[in-house]
Image (cartoon, rainbow, N blue to C red):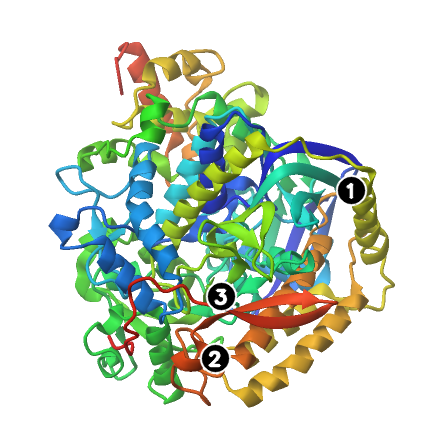
Amino acid sequence: MPTLTVRVKRFDGKKSWWQEYKVDVKSRRVSVLDVLLRIKEEQDPTLAVRYSCRMAICGSCGMVINGVPRLACQTLLTEIKDDVITVEPMWNYRVIKDLVVDTEPNFDKLKKIKPYILRDVKEIYESDKEFGQKPEDLEKYYNFAYCIECGLCMSACPVVATNPRFLGPMALAAAYRWSADSRDQGWPIRAKIVDSDEGVWSCHLAYTCSAVCPRGVDPGFAIQLVKVALMRRAKRL
Amino acid sequence: MEILKHDLLIIGSGIAGLRAAAQAAYTAKIDIAIISKVQVMRSHSVSAEGGMSAVLYPDKNNDSLDLHAYDTIKGSDYLADQDAVELLVRMAPLEVRYLERIGVPWSRHPDGRIYQRPFGGMSVPRTTFAADKTGFFIMSTLWQETLRFDNIKYYHEHFVTKLIIENGEFRGVTAIDLKTGELKLILAKAAIIATGGAGRLYRFTTTAHSTTGEMLGYAMRAGLALKDMEFVQWHPTALVPSGILVSEAARGEGGYLVNKEGERFMKRYAPQKMELAPRDIVSRAILTEIAEGRGFVHEESGMGYVGLDLRHLGEEVLNQKIPFIRELAHKYAGVDALSELIPVRPAVHYTMGGIHTDTYGRVLTPSGEWVKGLWAAGEAASVSVHGANRLGSNSLSECSVWGRLTGEQAAKYAMEAPAPSTDEKYIKIAQEEESRIFDKLLHKETNGISVYELKGRLQDTMEQHYGPFRHESTMKEGIPKLLKIREDFSRIRIEDGSRIYNQNLKDALELDGMIDVALAVAYGALARQESRGAHYRLDYPKRDDVNWLKHTLAYFVGGQLQLSYVPVRITKWTKFEERKY
C-alpha cells in the first residue's frame, strides 16, 4: 500500500504556490485523476481540476504530469513508477485556478478554419440524400477525426508558446481532417486561411504535438500533408 | 449582476442540445445561446459507444419502420407512448443521413453505404455506428457544425441554478459563470432543456462525473413534473471496478457472456436472443449468476462479476469494429480482450424518466398544460419512447430526432414571440438567488457536513434501496434515509470560500438538485406495485397491465413530493405480449 506524495502547482487568481498532499492507494491501477479526486473529496475541496468522463474521450483533464502534458484520467499509477507525482496546469494557457486553464482561445482558432462540411448548406439541411463515402475515402481523414480538443498539443507546441497568433496543431489538424473528407468542397477556402504566417508555415516540425496527443491524432503529420498540398497547388486533398 | 438577453436559450450541450442549436440556427436568424456547465464539446454524449438505430435500407436488411417500432415498444415493456415511437422511427433515418451530410465518419460498406450491426432487442441489424466511438464522433461533428453559424453564442462552464417560469411561461434562468463566480440573469423568449440524465445518483455507473441530473430537480422546483423516474437502466456490461462502459457493440459483434464455470448462462434466461436480449433482462441474469455463486470476485474491490468473452472474434473485428473496447479494457482493467475475459457487471447507465413533455418535446405542467416557450429533449426529457426499458442505440436516435424537432419549433416560436421582459421582478429573483447561493450556502459555519460525505450517503442509499431488485420493505427503509439527507443538506459545509472556479460550491448545488431527483425515483418505485422493464419488484414479479399501464408523474405541491398518473398513448400495438427473448 504505497503512500503517494502529490505535488500540485496551485493558483488562486492572484498568487501561485506548490502544495503537497499525501495519499494512500490500495492499488496502482488507478489514474492520476482518481488520486486528485480523492484529494478533493477527502483533504482539500478547494483544489480545482476540470474533469468529466474519466475514460479519455471528453478531453477535459489535460495537465502536465511529471513534466509531460497528459490526460489525468489516462495516466495510471502503473505508468508512473515513482511515488512522487508532480502536477501542473497545461503550459501555454492562462491559468484560471489551480489545474484549470482557459482553453477557449483554441475554440476561436478552430472556428477560423471552418471545421464543417463546406458545400451548399441548403443541400445539407433540406435534402434527405446520403452523400456516401467509400471505406478508402474514410481512411484518408479518419485518424485526424479522433481529436478530442483537449488542447494538450497546443500546450506542448514550442511555436504556440512564443506566437499566440499561430493557429496551432489542433486547428490545423482539423483543417486537414475537413478538407480531406470526400464530402467536403472547402479546400480552396481553407487553403487561403492556412497558407499564411498564422497557418502551417509557422510550424517548426518539433512534432511535440504528435508526441503528446492522447488519441494518436498526429497533428504534426496533418500539418505536413497540408504543406505538401499547398506546394503542389492541389485542387483538393 | 450581468443581465443578458437572447431569443433562444439551449441548456445543455450534448447531442440533443447541439442538434437543437444547429437546427434552430438554420431555421431562423435569431439570437441563440448554448449554456453548459461543462465546455460545450465535453458533455456526456461523447461517451456513447455502440451506435444509433435507424431503418436505413429496409430492403437489404429485411427491415421496416413498423418492425423498429415494434421492437422498441416491446423492449419498453409497453410503457412507451406509441405515437412518439412512430415519430422516432420515422425521423431516425433522416437524422442518420443529416449527420452523414455534416460529416460524421460512419463506418461503411465497400460500396459506400452506411454499415449497420445487431444490437440487443433489435430484430435485425439496424445500429449505425462510427467504430465504437459513435457518441464522440457525433458530438465532435455537431459541435463543429454549430461553429458554421454566427448566431450561436456559447456560455461554456456556466451552471444554471434556477429556471424562471411565471404564469405558465418560460422567462429565463440564473446561472453562475464558474470561471468568475459571477451570477448572471439570462432572459430569453424560449428555451430547450437538454441536460441529460442522472446516472450519478448511484455509485456504480457508466456515466460521466458531470451526469448528476440536478436540472431535473430544479425543474420540479420550478413547478414542472418528472415522468417515470423509477425506471433506471442498468447496462449489463460495465468494466470492473471503474464502471466504465463496455458497449453492447461487443455483444452485437458476437461477444459471449460467461460465468466462472465457463458457461454461456444467457441460455437459461433468454434462449433465443442470448446475449442480445434487452438490457434489463441481461443485467438481471448477470446479477443472478453472481448472487448464486457462479460469478468471479474482483480481489481489490470485492465486486462480483462475469466474463465478457471476445476472444473468438479475432484481432480484425476487435481492431476495426470495437477498438475502443479493447483499449479501455487494456487500460483500465489490465486485460487484453484478444486473449482474456473482460471483467464486467451491470452499472447504472440511463434515466428512462425525465421532464414530462408531449410527443413533440413541449414541456407540460403536472396537469398537462404546455409551459409556453419551453421544450425538453434527449435524456433529460421523457417523451416517452423508451418506456420502462430503453433498447441500446435508441438514445442517440432520440437525442438527434428531438434535438431537431425542438430546435425547429423553438426557433419558429422565438421569431414570433415578443422580446423578453426585463421587469424588475426578474432582477429581484436573481438577487435572491445570489443571496441564497453566495451569502447563505457559501458561508456556512465550519462544523457542517462535507458535500462528498453527503453525496456518498445519497449514492449508497440509492444502490442499497432502489437497485435492480426492489422490494417494498427495503424501499420503505430508504425513504427516511433520503429525507434525512434532504434535512442534512441544510448543514452542508463548503470549504472553498472563493468565487473563481469554485467546484466545491458547484458540487453542493448539484447535490441539492440530485436529492430531489432521488426522491422522485424512490417514491415512484415504491408506489409501482408491479415489475415492468427495468423496474423489478421481488414482491410483485409480474407486469400488471390492468393497474399499472400508466406513466408516473412526480412533482412538488407545497414542498411535498406528489405522484399522479397519466395514460400511455396506444396506437396500433395493442397485443401486450409477455417479453420473452
Q: Is residue B386 visible?
A: yes
Q: In the drawing, does residue A102 fall left or right of residue B256?
A: right
Q: Report which residue position mark 1 lands on.
A: B426
The numbered mark, 2 or 3, whose residue comes first in the sequence reads 3
Q: Report which residue position mark 2 lands on.
A: B302
The residues bearing labels 1 and 3 have C-alpha atoms spaced at a distance of 38 Å
Q: Specify few, some or many for label 3: CA neighbours under 10 Å numbering under 14, 14-19, or 20 or more.
A: many
Assess whether mark 3 and mark 1 are in contact (beta carbons under 8 angstroms).
no
The residues bearing labels 1 and 2 have C-alpha atoms spaced at a distance of 52 Å
Q: In the drawing, does residue B514 fall left or right of residue A45?
A: left
Q: Which of marks 1 and 2 is in front?
A: 1
Looking at the rendered structure, the secondary structure element under dot 2 is: loop
Q: In the drawing, does residue B427 fall left or right of residue B151?
A: right
Q: Report which residue position mark 3 lands on.
A: B205
> Is A178 drawn above or below residue A202 in the view shown?
below
- Judging from the image, mark 2 belongs to the subunit labelled B
Q: Which quarter of the figure is the C terminus of chain B placed in?
A: bottom left
